[in-house]
Amino acid sequence: MAEQTIWGIHAGKTGDAESLFTHQNCVAVGWPAMGDLSGLKLTREAFKARYSEIFPTKSAGHVPVAAGQLFRFVQEIKPGDLVVFPAKLDRTVRIGRVTGGYIHRPDASKAYPNQRSVEWLKSFPRTKFSQGALYEIGSALSLFQVKNFADEFRAALTGEAFVAPVSEDEAVAAVVMESEQSTEDFVLKRLAHEFKGHALEHFVAHLLEAMGFRARVTKKSGDGGVDIIAHKDALGLEPPIIKVQVKSTEGSIGEPEVKQLKGNLSGGEKGLLVTLGTISPKAELFARTVPDIRLIDGENLVKLILEHYEQFDSRYRAAVPLKRVYLPAPPEGEGA
């Protein structure tokens, strides 16, 4: 007999449907504007077409993700499947069995009218599960299939001993790595959208000021490829004087750009090139042969922003909104 499929489901971003789940013995998804989904042709294309009709401003990338969750809830979940529900309010993990088909019940919940009946079997503290299992059911989707750690949830339900296929250290490292990558992607996207062209020069100048430098943005044109002049003293008379070139491109910076910056330096001056994109291997190699030039790519720019974010003024914090969070610490040597 084939093993039951396990689905993960969330009760809203803030747990607003948790009472519905537990007291009405059901699981549900929102999107009430979609109406009764039982009348739709049971194909993904039909669900996407309806979603696009109801939410015409949603992006082409968003539509298949949202419509796909609704399709799976209506069509792919079967009676007998297991559901894992991580509750936010009491920090437990509930496991249940689906007992019925799709029903549309706006009378029971206006916000979560798309429902399925469930028999809740067991509830566990989150500490029962490995970090990897918790990470999987922490998916950003409202509805998703649990695959990687499905056996761990089955074992918890039957009371069997279970050894996770991935070590705690590896799971922690994966959580941290993905969180860091998501943060980097977010910051770079915000910079690309909020600070186009000359505006990015002002942002980088502000970053340099947060690092303890005096920084002055040059004129928009005729500056010979130098966008910012930075220095430590108040008047800019004491060395080193740092000439900064800022590239808002998300592509790769090549050796010619680095050579151009080098050509703008006089005796004792330092050069700094900052880009949202990457640095080509040839440009990196050339910079290593020139002791007075430093290159900062998008990844390292984000690291500097995070390091000095507390010193940013409110305008720049609003443009790149971040908050301090604590993540598990990977074991020493991880990722080295």
Image (spheres, rainbow, N blue to C red):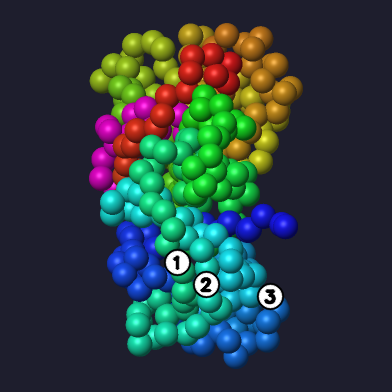
What residue does disc 2 label?
99
Considering only order in the chain, which callout, 1 or 3, is on the residue closer to the N terminus?
3
Considering only order in the chain, which callout, 3 or 2, is on the residue closer to the N terminus?
3
Q: Amino acid at mark 1?
A: Glu
Disc 2 to disc 1: CB gap under 8 Å: yes
Residue 268, labelled with which disc? none
Q: Amino acid at mark 2?
A: Thr
Q: Count of labels shown?
A: 3
What residue does disc 3 label?
44
Residue 65: % across, % down: 59, 65
Residue 131: % across, % down: 47, 35
- Reply yes or no: does residue 307 show up in magenta: yes
Per the rendered image, the range of residues in magenta is: 301-315
Q: Residues within 10 Å of mark 1 (few under 14, many from 20)?
A: some
Q: Which residue lies at the image location 32% right of the left edge and 41% below the top edge?
A: 323
Q: Residues within 10 Å of mark 2 (few under 14, many from 20)?
A: some
Considering only order in the chain, which callout, 1 or 2, is on the residue closer to the N terminus?
2
Residue at mark 2 to residue at mark 3: CA–CA distance = 24 Å
Q: Which residue lies at the image location 59% right of the left edge and 76% below the top edge?
A: 74
Residue at mark 3 to residue at mark 1: CA–CA distance = 28 Å
> Is the residue 135 above or below the residue 16 in the image?
above
